[in-house]
Image (tube, rainbow, N blue to C red):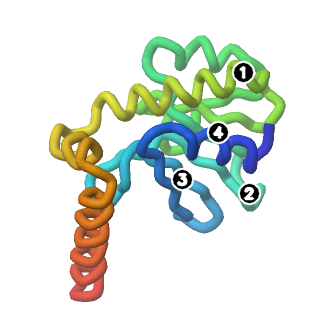
Amino acid sequence: MDVERIREFLLKLPHVEETMQWGENLVFWAGDKAIGGKMFALANLDGSGKGVLSFHAGTDRYNELLENEGVIPAPYMARIYWVCLEQWDVLPQRELEALLTRAYELVFAKLPKRTKDILAMPAAQQRKLIAERRKLLASQKKQR
């Protein structure tokens, strides 16, 4: 696996968005962050840091995954049951895809009702609302 294959796979999941944040990190969100979406995976693109991919493992799989060589607690996120892969080849592709799908499902299940309601809207209405929300957030940021 590599970042392009991961990106291609994750963007096929429903309501997944991506952003670049914190330097060279590609962040994957369940729902757009402008409407309350939550991140579920993060790929480190610049090679700095301890790993290449971090994701939400959930309480049930966290300790089990840490038993694999090359899987470590995710920096800054271990307390909320995120793991980090030190290299792309630590886990087989099918297992990694299943784990990332599960990460998405766990995070999506905990989204606020209003966020899920927006994601259930027709696409055009949803895009309009998200665009308005982004404008509002940008204007608030400028005022600070």
Work out whether residue 130 can be spotted: yes
Question: Which mark, by number, is residue 9?
Answer: 4
Distance between the alpha carbons at the discs numbered 3 and 2: 16 Å
According to the picture, the residue beneath numbered tag 1 turns out to be 94
Sequence-wise first label, 4 or 3: 4
Q: In which quarter of the image is the N terminus?
A: top right
Task: Determine which quarter of the picture holds residue 95.
Answer: top right
Q: In which quarter of the image is residue 64?
A: top right
Viewer-nearest of discs 2 and 4: 4
Q: Which amino acid does label 2 sit on?
A: Ser
Q: Is residue 131 above or below residue 3?
A: below
Residue 12, given in percent of the width and then of the height, sits at 57, 41
Q: Residues within 10 Å of mark 4 (few under 14, many from 20)?
A: few
Please state which of the two labelled residues, at mark 1 or mark 2, is closer to the viewer: 1
Q: Residue 39 carries which label?
A: none
Q: Residue furthest bottom?
A: 143
Look at the numbered disc 3 and give the secondary structure of its residue.
strand
Q: Name the residue under label 2.
A: 48
Mark 3 or mark 2, earlier in chain: 3
Q: How far apart are marks 4 and 3 (CA)?
A: 14 Å
Which mark identifies residue 27?
A: 3
Q: Residue furthest left?
A: 114
Horizontal arrangement in the rendering, residue 74 relative to residue 135 (left or right): right
Mark 3 residue crowding within 10 angstroms, few (<14) / some (14–19) / many (20+)? many
Badge nearest the viewer, 4 or 3? 4
**Quadrant occupied by the C terminus:** bottom left
Instruction: State how far apart marks 1 and 2 are (Cα).
Output: 26 Å
Q: Is mark 1 on a helix, strand or loop?
A: helix
- The residue depicted at 24 percent of the width and 40 percent of the height is 116
Residue drawn 70% across the image and 34% down it: 85
Dots 4, 3 in contact, CB < 8 A: no
Residues at marks 3 and 2 touching, judged by CB atoms closer than 8 Å: no
